[in-house]
């Protein structure tokens, strides 16, 4: 069991899917992303954002809308096709696309024919080199037809948004899906050739008890998920207005959330899952667990990943592209995204050029979150010494010379410890969620 130190978790901190974080982005000069893409070499990964869902869950902070308005979906997909063609015209011959991920939203909220047309466009315009395909799926809109398409494309990695199996919690978050529906989805995906299946689960949900979480973990392990992400629900209705639908007085308090995170860790590691970073778990055979063991785990906009590529190009409204020296976010507003993309232009006008100092601090933060330790430059040891002391004193971290290690009991504090190296923080604390 982890020890709860509320004073050390009092500050809201970023999830650090990038450093600097998206909250630190500013305006980019026209053509910045185009120039970075023109210099991309070797293996690259591509992410495609499909911002539609059949139904919108009350808790969701994603950039997504209901898929019922067909004309809107079709116009968006036309812009995405144009953006794929534009990317193809910019990429140098030396670039090789090795991974393709579909996320959202729910990629399976569009029609199977529309999905296959996007896959065809990727083959036609981009230098694909036996890429690994992955997709995020909403079990509520998964069908036999969708699983056949997933099999025909060669998707081997899939992630299902499950969140909780408890019906009363599902009702409170506006996401009702039966156990039968999830079981059927698992069978379909396995038959389609998915070898790495992730379940997203949540703790800290309205009306959720520890027993509810334990039941959800039990179903998940019995269904054989290869990976499990256990996220803490972040209640920030001032940033995500649809969360006002969630009854605030039914949310577990901070100590209960901590206990739930601790239980999830205990139960899943007890079932043979390896802890990956601070909120993921994977069976030892899964590539994510192998990356953890070999010290090659990375963190990018999709969270923890075994993807070694230095370049990730995001397509679609609000998608973020990452390069060692640049982070660039596409236009979030789908109307403006469609207009720019339709003109054959990339829509990223927002982002940050990563300075050598950003890259140096980003490497420390990534090492702490992915490997649980980092070799610190001497000036950073001196800079954080005073703020690090409470974590050292509490036995949550250890500093030997310039080597900082997060100790096993320090895992729930990893984001707070990593944030000590963030030169941008203290500026916008309200924009982040609690660290547990
Ligand atoms: S299905 Fe996923 S992306 Fe869509 S609203 Fe629900 S949580 Fe958000």
Image (cartoon, rainbow, N blue to C red):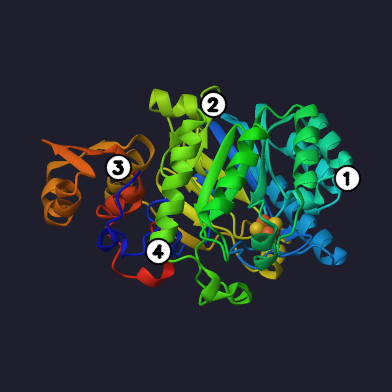
- Pointers 1 and 4 in contact (C-beta within 8 Å): no
Q: Name the residue under label 2.
A: 287
Choose between 122 and 50: the one closer to the eye.
50
Residue tagged 3: 409
* Label 4 element class: helix
Q: Tag 4 or tag 3, which sits nearer the N-term?
A: 4
Which callout, 1 or 3, points to the residue nearer the camera? 3
Spatial CA span between label 1 and label 3: 49 Å
The residue carrying pointer 3 sits among few (fewer than 14), some (14 to 19) or many (20 or more) residues within 10 Å by Cα, namely some
- Judging depth in this view, the residue of 115 and 213 nearest the camera is 213
> Does residue 91 show up?
no
Q: Who's the residue at 72% across and 53% down the image?
A: 106
| Label 2 CA crowd tier, 10 Å (few <14, some 14–19, many 20+) | some
Sequence-first tag of 1 and 3: 1
Write down the residue under mark 1.
113
Q: Which structural element holds mark 2? A: helix
- Across the whole image, how many numbered discs are drawn on residues? 4
Quadrant for the C terminus, please. bottom left
Left or right, 312 with respect to 359, comes to right
Q: Which of marks 1 and 2 is nearer the N terminus?
A: 1
Q: In which quarter of the image is the N terminus?
A: top left
Disc 2 under 8 Å from ligand 1? The reply is no
Is mark 3 in CB contact (under 8 Å) with mark 4? Answer: no
The picture quadrant where one finds residue 98 is: top right
């Amino acid at each position: 069991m982890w020890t709860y130190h509320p004073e050390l978790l009092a500050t809201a901190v970023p999830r650090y899917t990038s450093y600097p974080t998206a909250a630190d982005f500013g305006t980019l000069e026209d053509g910045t992303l185009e120039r970075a893409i023109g210099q991309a070499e070797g293996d690259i990964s591509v992410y495609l954002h499909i911002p539609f869902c059949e139904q919108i869950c009350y808790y969701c902070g994603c950039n997504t809308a209901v898929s019922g308005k067909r004309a809107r979906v079709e116009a968006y997909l036309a812009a995405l096709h144009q953006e794929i063609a534009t990317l193809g015209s910019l990429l140098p011959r030396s670039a090789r696309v090795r991974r393709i991920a579909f996320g959202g939203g729910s990629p399976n909220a569009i029609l199977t024919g529309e999905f296959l047309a996007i896959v065809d466009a990727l083959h036609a315009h981009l230098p694909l080199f036996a890429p690994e395909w992955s997709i995020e799926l909403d079990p509520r809109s998964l069908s036999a037809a969708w699983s056949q398409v997933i099999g025909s494309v060669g998707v081997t990695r899939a992630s299902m948004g499950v969140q909780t199996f408890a019906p009363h919690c599902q009702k409170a978050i506006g996401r009702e899906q039966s156990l039968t529906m999830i079981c059927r989805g698992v069978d379909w995906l396995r038959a389609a050739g998915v070898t790495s299946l992730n379940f997203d689960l949540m703790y800290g949900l309205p009306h959720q008890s520890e027993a509810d979480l334990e039941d959800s973990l039990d179903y998940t392990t019995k269904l054989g998920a290869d990976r499990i992400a256990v996220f803490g629900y972040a209640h920030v209705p001032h940033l995500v207005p649809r969360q006002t639908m969630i009854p605030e007085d039914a949310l577990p308090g901070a100590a209960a959330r901590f206990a739930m995170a601790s239980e999830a860790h205990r139960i899943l590691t007890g079932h043979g899952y390896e802890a990956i970073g601070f909120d993921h778990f994977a069976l030892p055979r899964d590539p994510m667990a192998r990356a953890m063991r070999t010290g090659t785990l990375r963190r990018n906009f999709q969270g923890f990943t075994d993807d070694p590529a230095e370049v990730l190009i995001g397509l679609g409204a609000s998608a973020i592209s990452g390069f060692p020296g640049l982070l660039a976010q596409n236009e979030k507003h789908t109307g403006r995204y469609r207009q720019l993309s339709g003109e054959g232009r990339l829509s990223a006008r927002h982002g940050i050029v990563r300075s050598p100092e950003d890259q140096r601090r980003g490497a420390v933060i990534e090492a702490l979150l992915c490997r649980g330790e980092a070799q610190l430059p001497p000036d950073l040891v001196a800079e954080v010494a005073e703020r690090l002391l409470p974590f050292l004193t509490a036995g949550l971290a250890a500093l030997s010379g310039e080597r900082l290690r997060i100790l096993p009991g320090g895992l729930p504090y990893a984001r707070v410890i990593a944030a000590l190296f963030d030169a941008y923080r203290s500026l916008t604390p309200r924009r982040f969620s609690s660290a547990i």
